Amino acid sequence: MTTRPILIVANQFHAPTIERLDHAFETVHLWKLSNEAKLAKLAELEGRCHAAASASWATDPLLYTLKSLRLIACFGVGVDGIDFRKTAELGIRVSNTPGVLDDAVAEIALGLVLSCARRLVSADSFVRAGNWQQGPFPFGMGLASKTVGIAGLGRIGLEIAKRCESFKMRVAYHNRSPREIDYDYYSSLEELAAASDILINVLPGGPATASRLGTEVFRALGPKGLFINVGRGQSVDELALVNALEASEIAGAGLDVYAQEPNVPAALTGRDDVVLLPHIGSSTRETRMAMGALVRQNLDAFFRDDPLISEVS
Ligand code: NAP
Ligand code: 8YV
């Protein structure tokens, strides 16, 4: 009889994927245990368990007490939930799910752009409230010939750029270094914001980008500018964003991500110049299944001693 490898599932990241992992591995559902029970279980697994699967934006810090752990296979591309100081110290490799979610996140980014520019959510409320009979809805902003600034022109950023081109927009971007691509490059976020009608954040989270989008960036974007965030909430100084909206220093914002999810600042929920989504960038049925398949492929490669499909270096 062949024994199945032991796999820790750190949190409940996607039920259909976890169900499949339950069939392939001897899974331990860590999130179901109390902290005391987790520590006891991890001690019992010492030397016998070498891999865990986890959401990418969050994991269980108690995982790092398992000294035989060698892989955290993340469900998600943004790995800001991983403590890379710890993984380096303990010799733990990390995989993620890049590429398979680019279309879904780009679709949500464009959905937010359209919702903010043409005020779709407010227009819907206007009709439902019976206000149309009293007069027309206020004008929105057209997209054709406007400049979209993309902060983080990587895999997802490129898919957003392609879609913006089809709306006849000009594309500009900021990365740490320019790409070989025919879009205008700005070496600072402030310069990019100043050149943009719509600024879209797709930067990864983590210390390098923490609160990078703040007062100066919003002032540079200007009173007609729209800010869209599908990257990470921690990259935004949310207080500065609220202040910029309250002072009409920018025209509006469309947000999929927040600094302290699932908590959204009350100062935002009361405003009709913002569109607020509950971190649904990658949440289509197809995309989540593809992310789960990539988690599985990375685990299989690890247990065969093959190179990982998508290792975070
Ligand atoms: P990616 O391909 O690695 O692209 C990231 C881009 O950001 C790269 O072009 C990189 O260029 C730039 N960058 C990285 N660090 C930077 C820094 N400190 N300053 C300036 N530019 C920097 O990643 P991706 O697959 O497109 O994903 C991007 C992020 O989207 C993820 O990390 C995640 O946080 C977020 N995301 C959100 C959702 C959602 O549901 N809303 C879903 C998936 C992903 P350089 O290396 O040249 O700087
Ligand atoms: C989440 C994301 O991971 O991939 C990312 O970085 O932000 C999302 O796809 C998703 O909510 C799965 O937990």
Image (tube, rainbow, N blue to C red):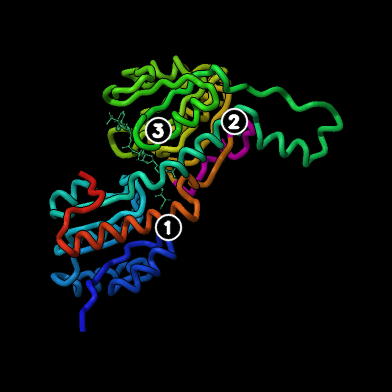
Observer able to see residue 40: no
Q: Earlier in the sequence, mark 3 or mark 2?
A: 2
Identify which amino acid the numbered label 3 is placed on.
Gly
Range of the magenta residues? 261-274
Q: Are marks 1 and 3 in contact (CB under 8 Å)?
A: no
- In the picture of the structure, the residue carrying the numbered disc 2 is 116
Residue 289 image label: 1
Image position of 154 with respect to 78: above or below: above
Name the quadrant containing residue 18: bottom left
Instruction: Determine whether the residue tagged by mark 1 lies in a helix, strand or loop.
Output: helix
For the residues labelled 3 and 2, the Cα–Cα distance comes to: 19 Å
Rendered location of residue 81, percent (x, y): 32, 49
Observer able to see residue 162: yes
Rendered location of residue 186, percent (x, y): 35, 17
Image position of 138 with respect to 286: above or below: above
Q: Earlier in the sequence, mark 1 or mark 3?
A: 3
Label 3 CB less than 8 angstroms from ligand 1? yes
Ligand 1 image-quadrant field = top left
Quarter of the image with the C terminus is top left
Image position of 304 with respect to 190: above or below: below
- In the picture of the structure, the residue carrying the numbered disc 3 is 157
**Hey, which residue is sitting farthest bottom in the picture?**
1
Name the quadrant containing residue 143: top right
